Amino acid sequence: MTERPPATDRLTPRAREIVAAARDLLEESGPALLTMRTLADRLGIRAPSLYKHFPDKHAVEVELTARMLQESAEALEAAETRAPGSLAALAEAYRVYALAHPHLYRLATERPLPRAELPAGLEDRAALPLLRACGGDLDLARATWAFAHGMVILEIHGRFPADADLDAAWKRGLKALHP
Amino acid sequence: MTERPPATDRLTPRAREIVAAARDLLEESGPALLTMRTLADRLGIRAPSLYKHFPDKHAVEVELTARMLQESAEALEAAETRAPGSLAALAEAYRVYALAHPHLYRLATERPLPRAELPAGLEDRAALPLLRACGGDLDLARATWAFAHGMVILEIHGRFPADADLDAAWKRGLKALHP
DNA sequence: GCAGGGCGGCTAACGGTGTTAGCCGCATCC
DNA sequence: GGATGCGGCTAACACCGTTAGCCGCCCTGC
């Protein structure tokens, strides 16, 4: 049995400081500069000292993933409160959050979900607002999620032509999926 | 002006061998083992010799991206020939190709497109079958592309629950986008 | 037939990466 | 007051992409 600390305080205070610094570093400078040495620099310590708080770099990234999941869940829940049942409001909130934190969004999204190491229930919580807006239709919710993620990640990677009208594509897709 | 070799023979024979080895290595072992040293090993030479043929690793990856774009364009064109106008057939071909080459698909997809270094017209060629199937509706084509990419990349990353019925989600999304 | 040039290998090395081993100062607690 | 352990440290390792510089061989021009 791997003992997992309760979701309320899975991290020591110092570990939380490290995660906060890692998040700042990632969002400011991108993944290439999220390095154990530069992270340690920012905290005024040496890289090997980080291993007193996390077993490896991956564990730090898992915490960043957890924060992204939680924050996006909060953003979606807030949108739901503002405009109950509105899929357009959810989509807009999703897009705004992802584009405001592209490096974090990529980190949390472009690799397998470390489900075993994440707080229990977090993945479901992040998915629930969309599922509710889809009236419990799982297939529709998954298709809509794929659409939203596709739009956001393609935009982040500059995959669309520079002159593409992405607002129009969003509207077109949402109208089709949720007429 | 940067002179770019014509699309027919942008690479020397030896460079093509290197790209082929890189592709095998990537598809067999994943991106973590696509290393200048292991790539050289597979060719029976030393890593620095690779730099006689490519300026850097990025240039090799660009060639892999070009191959993925071309092959997926061919897969889509073949599907179009088999079932003209069928968006479902295009989607199936896209999904099958991506899932058959997940590492290559990720490499070509999860970073900005190196448009300046790609053969002219390749990006458009890869996009045209879908645009045709959408009757020239750019917004619909982009929404559909985002949906398909989202489905594929989320599946590759194991983002959906293990028991999710992805066939049903594909059908649901395609039906909505192309009733 | 011979000189020159360049293609395509090679070794050695540099700086950067994640990570480990082992040391130590200092606070806390019996 | 002595033990424990937390949280720093330095040194070092293996691996990464990449550069510098050397060299053998083949092809060409004379």
Image (cartoon, coloured by chain):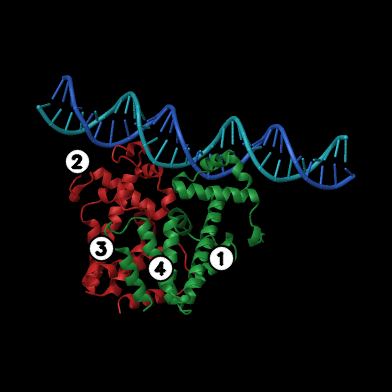
Chain colours: A red, B green, C cyan, D blue
Tell me the number on the disc at residue B146: 4
Label 2 sits on residue: A1
Q: Give residue B80's position: percent from left, percent from top.
A: 49, 72
Horizontal side of residue A86 vs B152, given as left or right: left
What kind of residue is marked 3? Ala
Quarter assignment of residue A14: top left
Chain letter for mark 4: B
Helix, strand, or loop for circle 2? Answer: loop
Image coordinates for residue A54, horizontal then vertical, percent: 30, 41
Whichever of labels 3 and 2 marks the residue nearer the N terminus, that label is 2
**Residue at the disc numbered 1:** B122
| Chain of residue at mark 1 | B
Are labels 3 and 2 on one chain?
yes
What label does residue A127 carry, if any?
3
Amino acid on which the number 4 mark rests in the picture: Ala
Q: Are marks 4 and 1 on the same chain?
A: yes
Secondary structure at numbered mark 3: helix
In this view, the residue in front, B79 or B173, is B79
For label 4, the SS is helix
Seen at 23% across and 60% down, the residue is: A124
D16 or A27: which is nearer to us?
Answer: D16
Residue A33 place in picture, x, y as percent:
43, 48
Q: CA distance from mark 1 to mark 3?
A: 37 Å
**Discs 1/3, front:** 1
Instruction: Tell me the distance, in whole angstroms, between the alpha carbons under discs 4 and 3.
Output: 19 Å
Local packing at callout 4 (Cα closer than 10 Å; few below 14, some 14-19, many 20+) is many
